[in-house]
Amino acid sequence: MSMLIFEISKPGRRCSTLPKCDVDFVAVPEEFKRNIPMNLPEVAEIDLVRHYTNLSRNAFGVDNGFYPLGSCTMKYNPKINEDVAALKGFTAVHPLQPEETVQGSLEAMHVLGDRLCKITGMDAITLQPAAGAHGEFTGLSMIKAYQLDKGETQRNKLIVPDSAHGTNPASAVMAGFTVVNIPSTPEGTVDIDALKKAVGDDTAALMLTNPNTVGLFEKDIVKIAEIVHNAGGLLYYDGANLNAVMGITRPGDMGFDVTHLNLHKTFSTPHGGGGPGSGPVACKAILAPFLPAPVVTFNNGAYTFAKPAKSIGRVRSFYGNFLVYIRALTYIMSIGAEGIREAAENAVLNANYMMEMLKDSYDVPFGGPCMHEFVLSIERLKKQTGISAADIAKGLVDKGIHPPTMYFPLIVPEALMLEPTETESRETLDNAIRAFKEVYAMAFDNPQALRDAPLTTPVGRPDETTAVRNPILSYTVNN
Ligand SMILES: *Cc1c(COP(=O)(O)O)cnc(C)c1O
């Protein structure tokens, strides 16, 4: 393991040469001075460069290799996004500056909002939420406010299919709803009869993603929307899977009333540790009065912040992750409307190609063409060899591939979910297919090697429970 930068520190080492001070020295008054000197690492420039270069090699990112993490859309993040987000005009503004001095930044937010509304088929938008789950909470809070505003105080149930992403029921509970789970059909789509039985006077909304979490398109979506609307409920679209359909179909046209988008998935901005996320929420006109404040509006030739009439309030400090918006806007403007559609088409093509090529070894629980991702089940292989989905995933790490999503969706035992995305070449997919097949063969020929994998990473197999329940996240400085 790498040493901490504090451990390589030696008193007096420096990597900066400051110019001679050209103003008079003013002593800091005693009462403002620290009692103990600040503990800063002292290193030479070469040690600093090596330290961070080596640290970066301990992690795996989309810039290192293939990253088919299902449901996460780990597409390549074009570097032009970074160039535009680094422009002084965007980085040197302050959120408390008067509106008339930041018209360009407001325009960028307005244009991004407009493009996202066009892509989703919605009328109004907030860019504030900081992630997908935060967007879910925001959109569901708007639905709650809408139902209460209509005097429908009894509408406290949120219908969620059993295949849903874990954040869906969690956000529903956070927003004060009771979750009603409905089962999926054996084909993996919404059970219409179960939905008909579940809706009623107490239905606030149905929360759905389409294509759904097993990678299938809900063909009956218009009928589903009708059933929910006729019962007085609204439809929430989990837009995390928009990469499969953008430019082809729109949640607004399918009958959804509100959706969040993951800029860090579909719109090529960095994920998690690579940068802050962003989960804008777009909605139909009926929900626009409930959007969080402030929203950017354009009146009499100027951009201003405004508060929607029945706003649920602020959900994020200032205006959200502004430089992430700039990256997403750069992506949308550089590929254009045609590129948006092409991205979705190639994402679906790549997923189907991989699925077809893996079908003769791995079990594919849901047949037929998939959308942008697909699910494999290791259940039968596990019965035959004792090798689990986790073992397969660890074996792939040694082949330079980030594991697929494991043990999700929950309705498939020993699941592996793959989402290759549109940015991977035929050669990368073929190499990955070969690696998946090699690992599959290892389950029979050399299962112990798979149980020992990975051998090429700084950390092999941590105790996953301890790593989650008792992580050591702090370091005690001895001096
Ligand atoms: C990623 C994802 C979310 C949550 O998004 P975060 O930005 O991680 O909070 C919600 N639903 C689905 C289907 C997702 O894939």
Image: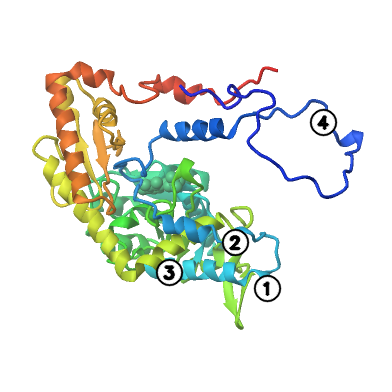
Q: Nearer the viewer, mark 1 or mark 3?
A: 1
Contact, mark 3 vs mark 2 (Cβ under 8 Å): no
Q: Which residue is mark 3?
A: 115
Which residue lies at the image location 48% right of the left edge and 43% below the top edge? 173
The local secondary structure at tag 1 comes to helix
Which residue, as the protein is rendered here, is positioned at the far left?
360
Amino acid type assigned to the residue bearing label 2 in the image: Lys
Q: Residue at x 82, y 31 (%)?
A: 34
Residue under label 4: 34
- Closer to us: mark 2 or mark 4? 2
Sequence-wise first label, 4 or 3: 4
298 in relation to 71, above or below: below
Q: CA distance from mark 4 to mark 3?
A: 51 Å
Q: Are marks 2 and 4 in contact (CB under 8 Å)?
A: no
Q: Quadrant of residue 180?
A: top left
The local crowd at label 4, few if under 14, some if 14 to 19, many if 20 or more residues have their Cα within 10 Å, is: few
The reply, left or right, for residue 460 in relation to residue 330 is left
Report how far apart the C-alphas of labels 3 and 2 lie in the structure.
24 Å
Q: CA distance from mark 2 to mark 1?
A: 17 Å
Mark 2 / mark 4, whichever is N-terminal: 4
Dot placed on the residue nearer the N-terminal end, 1 or 3: 1
Q: Amino acid at mark 1?
A: Glu
Q: CA distance from mark 1 to mark 4?
A: 41 Å
284 sits left or right of 151 in the view: left
Can you identify the residue that label 1 sits on? 100
Q: In the rendering, which numbered label is found on residue 88? A: 2
Q: In the displayed image of the protein, which residue is found farthest to the front? A: 20
Of pointers 3 and 2, the one earlier in the residue sequence: 2
Q: Amino acid at mark 4?
A: Arg
Quarter of the N terminus within the rendering = top left
- Label 1 crowd bin: few (<14), some (14–19), many (20+), radius 10 Å: few
- Determine the residue positioned at 57% across, 76% down: 298
